[in-house]
């Protein structure tokens, strides 16, 4: 099997398995000794039996993954945020790690902790904070936060994956100390995105503006509660954020627009294009997964080879998990990974089943069903709801996302130049957005659209 399976895929699987096991197993000095012994034993066997050293590399990655997952999720250092769990009135200095999620009555911030206010040492970890909608905070703002650290409710449930990050209970006391403490390049990208968001907000009504901002820019903005509920009931909530599908549209568009430069240069320009787009929308787990996967496939094509999408998928997952083992416990990562896995494995099956249907129907329907098969358990487990209209809703919306992206991008570009000029394009942009909303609200309002499981 080792000879028939791509070696990179085996390494990725070994790394993911090691991180997953390491995240939930309590280890000690005995297990460390066993790990070293296993490596030595494998090396001896490989040399004695003249077996490929690939086995040694695979086992090494497996063990490295185990310890990476374990050390991250079972920290021994006193300089981690976990040491402050359930301490009341703890005051921390932290920096806003990404633009906040804005809701109707609150905003949620992901903060990178620097240190306790009364101590000089640097802390390791992140926290989530829910606070009032005003004053608004931005990426890079350094804050003083006072409250009680608690574990998220999800960590109290059984899970094979580590859960992160910690949260501050209630509405903690917050004070802005200074701005501009983030990465300058990322900060610039978020400022450009904020200007683009303003353009769409001024030219489009709600919820169409929030929808366009989510699909094109990845902005986590307040969506009317009834529309959000229907997005969940129709299992289309994933469409209002940037994911691999959005990046694939960008890649294909850039390759088409730059085809006259020649194949190699066109692919290189497409790679830089999705890197820039990812920087603009933010490196969330779905975007990061799609970016790594896309760059891997593009690089293979530049070298004259057809990229193995399945290997690229598992490679991207392993790289993300090695960088942050907590990513495996994030719903967004699980949905993105499983949906892509479903497309690669089951899409050809469903395309064969519907091969006699018109392509305009068979392609989106087959794609939708392939993704739904694999994400179904995660959706039910996390949202407690089974959607009976999900295949139909996602099939119809699948056809609308590309024109929404193209037209919203054009509207944004014109709006950044001249709002009055862009206003002439508002009608064509509003049409697919409004149709999207009508489909979601129409199917979501059906009494039998979904079933609450728990």
Image (tube, rainbow, N blue to C red):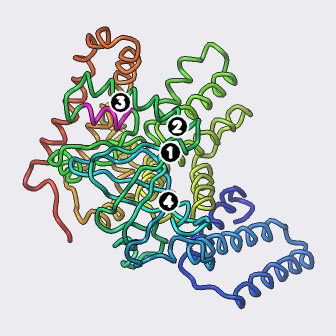
Residue 443 drawn at (x, y percent)? 14, 45
Q: Earlier in the sequence, mark 4 or mark 3?
A: 4
Q: Which mark is residue 187?
A: 2
Q: Earlier in the sequence, mark 4 or mark 1?
A: 4
Label 2 vs label 3: CA separation?
A: 15 Å
**Of 137 and 75, the residue lying toward us:** 137
Q: Kindly check if marks 2 and 1 are in contact, taking CB atoms under 8 A apart as contact.
A: yes
Q: Let me know if residue 287 appears in the view.
A: no
Label 1 vs label 3: CA separation?
A: 19 Å
The residue under label 3 is 197
The residue under label 1 is 140
State the predominant SS element of the stretch in magenta: helix
- Of all residues, the one furthest to the left in this rendering is 447
The residue under label 4 is 93
Q: Secondary structure at mark 2?
A: helix
- The residue stretch that appears in magenta: 209-216
Q: Secondary structure at mark 3?
A: helix
């Amino acid at each position: 099997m080792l000879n028939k399976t791509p070696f990179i895929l085996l390494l990725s699987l070994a790394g993911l398995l090691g991180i997953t096991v390491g995240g939930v197993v309590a280890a000690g000095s005995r297990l460390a000794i066993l790990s070293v012994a296993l490596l030595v034993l494998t090396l001896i066997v490989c040399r004695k039996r003249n077996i490929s050293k690939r086995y040694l590399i695979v086992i090494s990655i497996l063990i490295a993954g185990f310890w990476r997952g374990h050390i991250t999720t079972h920290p021994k250092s006193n300089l981690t945020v976990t040491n402050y769990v359930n301490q009341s009135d703890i005051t921390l200095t932290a920096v806003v790690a990404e633009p906040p999620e804005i809701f109707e009555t609150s905003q949620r911030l992901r903060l990178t902790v620097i240190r306790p206010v009364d101590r000089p040492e640097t802390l390791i970890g992140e926290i989530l904070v829910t606070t009032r909608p005003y004053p608004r905070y931005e990426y890079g703002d350094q804050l003083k936060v006072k409250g009680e650290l608690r574990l998220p409710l999800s960590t109290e449930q059984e899970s094979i994956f580590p859960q992160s990050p910690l949260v501050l209970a209630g509405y903690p006391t917050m004070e802005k100390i200074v701005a501009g403490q983030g990465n300058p390049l990322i900060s610039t990208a978020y400022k450009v995105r904020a200007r683009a968001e303003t353009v769409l907000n001024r030219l489009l009504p709600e919820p169409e503006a929030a929808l366009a901002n989510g699909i094109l820019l990845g902005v986590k903005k307040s969506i009317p509660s009834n529309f959000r509920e229907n997005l969940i009931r129709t299992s289309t909530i994933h469409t209002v954020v940037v994911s691999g599908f959005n990046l694939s549209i960008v890649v294909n568009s850039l390759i088409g627009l730059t085809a006259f430069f020649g194949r190699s240069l066109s692919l290189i320009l497409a790679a830089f294009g999705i890197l820039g787009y990812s920087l603009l929308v933010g490196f969330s787990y779905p975007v990061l997964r799609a970016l790594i996967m896309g760059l891997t496939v593009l690089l293979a094509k530049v070298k004259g080879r057809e990229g193995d999408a399945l290997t690229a998928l598992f490679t991207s997952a392993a790289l993300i998990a090695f960088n942050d083992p907590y990513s495996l416990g994030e719903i967004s990562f699980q949905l993105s990974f499983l949906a892509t896995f479903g497309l690669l494995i089951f899409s050809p099956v469903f395309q064969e089943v519907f091969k006699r249907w018109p392509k305009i129907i068979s392609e989106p329907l087959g794609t939708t069903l392939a993704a739904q098969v694999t994400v179904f358990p995660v959706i039910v487990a996390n949202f407690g709801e089974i959607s009976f209209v999900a295949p139909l809703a996602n099939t119809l919306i699948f056809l609308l996302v590309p024109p929404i992206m193209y037209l919203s991008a054009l509207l944004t570009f014109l709006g950044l130049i001249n709002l009055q000029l862009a206003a002439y394009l508002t009608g064509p942009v509003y049409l697919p957005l409004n149709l999207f909303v009508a489909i979601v609200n129409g199917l979501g309002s059906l009494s039998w659209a979904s079933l609450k499981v728990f």
